[in-house]
Image (spheres, rainbow, N blue to C red):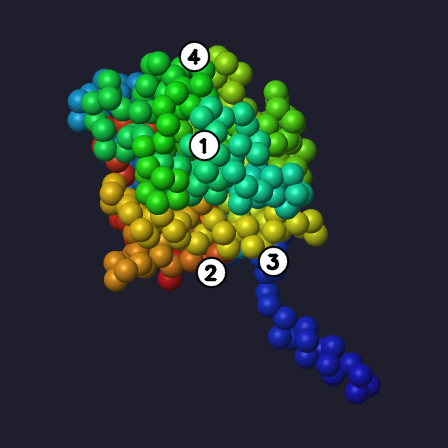
Amino acid sequence: MSFLYPLILSLLIAPLGPSFSSDHWPTEAWRTRSLSEAGIDEAKFARFLDYVFLKGKFETPQDCEAASQKKDKDFQTNALVIIKDSCLIYEKYVCGYTPNHKQFLLSISKSIMATLAGIAQFENRFHVTRPISSYVEVPQKEIWEKMKVDDLIRMSSGIKWDEIHQKKLHKNSLVHFLYGKGAKNIISYLFKSPPAEASGNLFRYSTGDSTLLTHALNQALGGEKALLQFSHDKLFAPLGIEEFTMERGPSGHFYGGSHIYLKPRDLAKIGLLARHRGLWGNKRLYAQDWHDYFTSVAPAWKKSNPEKLPVYGAQWWLNLETEGKRRPHPALPQDAFLAKGLFGQILAVVPSLDLVVVRNAFDTKKEIDANKMWELLMESLQ
C-alpha cells in the first residue's frame, strides 16, 4: 500500500478550483477568468473602472454625441480589455461599440508595423541595417542613400517634421501629410525635400518616418499589396485574427504609421505576442533579439531629444529610468512597454505581471491622466 501514499498526498495538497497557465494561446478564443481568480481586489478595481469610465458618463451613443458638442468635454474611453496570465479577465465597450467592432487605430499602428518588420527580418526578407535605397527608389542618392531602415524605425531619419508640438494646423506636418499637400501621394511628399539633419543623430517623433518604413517593407516584400498578404499570412492568421483593415492613401501607398483597424481583443493578441518575445504556441514569429531591439532605447533619443518626449525604442514607448529621470509611468514596472495613439489609445504590455491592457478612446479635448489610471490598476493587483 505504500505506493498509494504519494498519490493520496498529492491529491490532498493539490490546489482547489481551476488551474490557469500563463502560456495559454488564444488563437481560437480567449480563455476567461474572473477578477477574483486573477487575484484582483474587486473593490479597488471598481475605483479604477470608476475613473476610466467616469462612473458611466459615456455609455450610449447618445451620451457620446451630446458630450462631443461641449467645449469642456471630458476624456472618453470607448473600449477596455485586460488580459492577465493569458486570460481575458475584463472587457467593456461603450458608445455603441461591441467586441465585434474593428476600431480605428492611430499611432498604435506603428508598433504593429514594427512587429511586421521583425517578422520579415526573421525570414531574411528585410534588414534594418540596410539603407532604404536597398528597397525603394530614392531621389538625390548621395543624400538619401545614407539613410538606413534603422533610422526610420527609431525616428531619426533627419526628415524635417513637426507633429507633436505644432498646434497650428496649417503648419503641422501630419495635417499636411494626411489632408493637405501630401494627401495625394504620401511617399512623393516625403521625398520632396531632403533631410534637414544627418540621419541617426536627432530623435524626432514622425509619422512620416513610419510611413516610409512601411513603404520600404512593402517594396521588400514585392510591392503593390504585398504587405497586406504578408500581414495576413505571417501575423494575423497565426494569431487567429480573421478581420483587419490596413488603409492606403489615394496613391495606393499604405499609411503604416496609422489607419489600421482591429478589434480590441485582437489588438491584445499583438500585445501577448510581444509579451512572449515573438513566440506564439510552438511557433516563433520573430527573433528574440528583435524584441531586445525594439525595447532598447533609441540611440538618437539619448543624443538629442528636443521634443522632450518619454523614452522611445523602435516604434514602441518604453518605461525605463534614464539619465537620472524617473520612469514615464512610475506605477508600472520598468519592463513595461507601450504602443500609444492620439486621443488616448493605449496598448500596454507588462511582462513581469503577465499583463496586457488595451484602451481605445476618443480623448479629443481632455486626456485621461494615464499615471492615475495605472496607479489605480496597480493598486487592485496588490
| Residue 267 falls left or right of residue 143 | right
Residue 206: x and y in percent read: 36, 33
Could you tell which of marks 3 and 1 lies nearer the N-terminus?
3
Instruction: Using a 10 Å C-alpha cutoff, classify the residue at mark 1 as few (fewer than 14 neighbours), some (14 to 19) or many (20 or more).
Output: few
Disc number for residue 204: none
Disc number for residue 142: 1
Closer to the observer: label 1 or label 2? 1
* Snapshot quadrant of residue 189: top left
Residue behind mark 4: 184
Q: CA distance from mark 4 to mark 2?
A: 45 Å
Dot 1 amino acid type: Glu
Position of residue 104 relative to residue 126, above or below, is above
Q: CA distance from mark 3 to mark 2?
A: 15 Å
Residue behind mark 2: 352
Instruction: Using a 10 Å C-alpha cutoff, classify the residue at mark 2 as few (fewer than 14 neighbours), some (14 to 19) or many (20 or more).
Output: few
Dot 2 amino acid type: Ser
Residue 15: x and y in percent read: 60, 68
Dot 3 amino acid type: Ser
Q: Are marks 1 and 2 in contact (CB under 8 Å)?
A: no
Could you tell which of marks 3 and 4 lies nearer the N-terminus?
3
Closer to the observer: label 1 or label 4? 1
Closer to the observer: label 3 or label 2? 2
Q: CA distance from mark 1 to mark 2?
A: 46 Å
Could you tell which of marks 4 and 2 lies nearer the N-terminus?
4
Residue behind mark 3: 21
Q: Are marks 3 and 2 in contact (CB under 8 Å)?
A: no
